[in-house]
Amino acid sequence: MHLVRDSLSAAEDRGGLRPRVAIVGLGNPLRGDDGAGPLAVAAAREQLGGAGVAVLLIEQPLDLADGLQGYEGAFIVDACLCALPLGDVVSFSWPAEALEGYRSPSTHTMSLSQALALGATLGQLPPLVRVFAISGKEFGIGQPVGAAVRSGALVAAERIVEEVRACLSG
């Protein structure tokens, strides 16, 4: 499992409290546009500062169920192959049948939709799950994230920051 956690919560450091919300960058930064998820999460982290949010970097969707257990909300960013223009961002609240139309370009053992369905069946998903899919094209090993996808990742980060702040204040 390639799960990296980075808490932004000062409360966690002081009192052992777990952050209420996780933002998840799904993908591999060494595979071109597949690095959009980790890139978006890094940008959101910079804007959120110490807002009580955990940052998770996950390469395989199968690792989501364990990684999301115990949070009140999760905001997941992943690159996808779809009919949208390159770099466009679309978001869904889970469960969402529309998510099936956004397939992962990588060698994931299961799709994001399948992983979320498994997590729901096991009772390991938070009550709020939001997915941000960024349309990508180049997923070769050693490729950089393309300019349009990089821009899309920044748009996704801004949307996540807005939604996380609303979630934490509500």
Image (cartoon, rainbow, N blue to C red):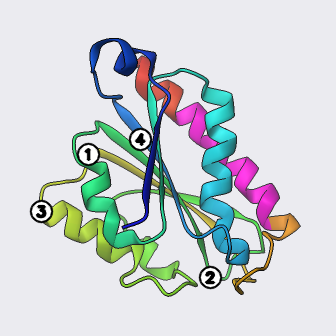
In the picture, the quarter occupied by the C terminus is top left
Residue shown at 35% from the left, 58% from the top: 94
Disc 4 and disc 3 in contact, CB within 8 angstroms: no
Task: Please state the extent of the stretch shown in magenta in the rendering.
Answer: 149-163
Which mark sits nearer the N-terminus, 4 or 2? 4
User: Would you call the spot at circle 2 few (<14 residues within 10 Å), some (14-19), or many (20 or more)?
Assistant: many
User: Would you call the spot at circle 4 few (<14 residues within 10 Å), some (14-19), or many (20 or more)?
Assistant: many
Label 1 vs label 4: CA separation?
10 Å
Q: Residue 44, labelled with which disc?
A: none
Label 4 vs label 2: CA separation?
24 Å
Residue furthest right in the image: 147
| Pointer 4 residue | 22
Disc 1 and disc 4 in contact, CB within 8 angstroms: yes
Q: Amino acid at mark 1?
A: Pro
Which mark sits nearer the N-terminus, 3 or 2? 2
| Pointer 3 residue | 122
| Pointer 2 residue | 81
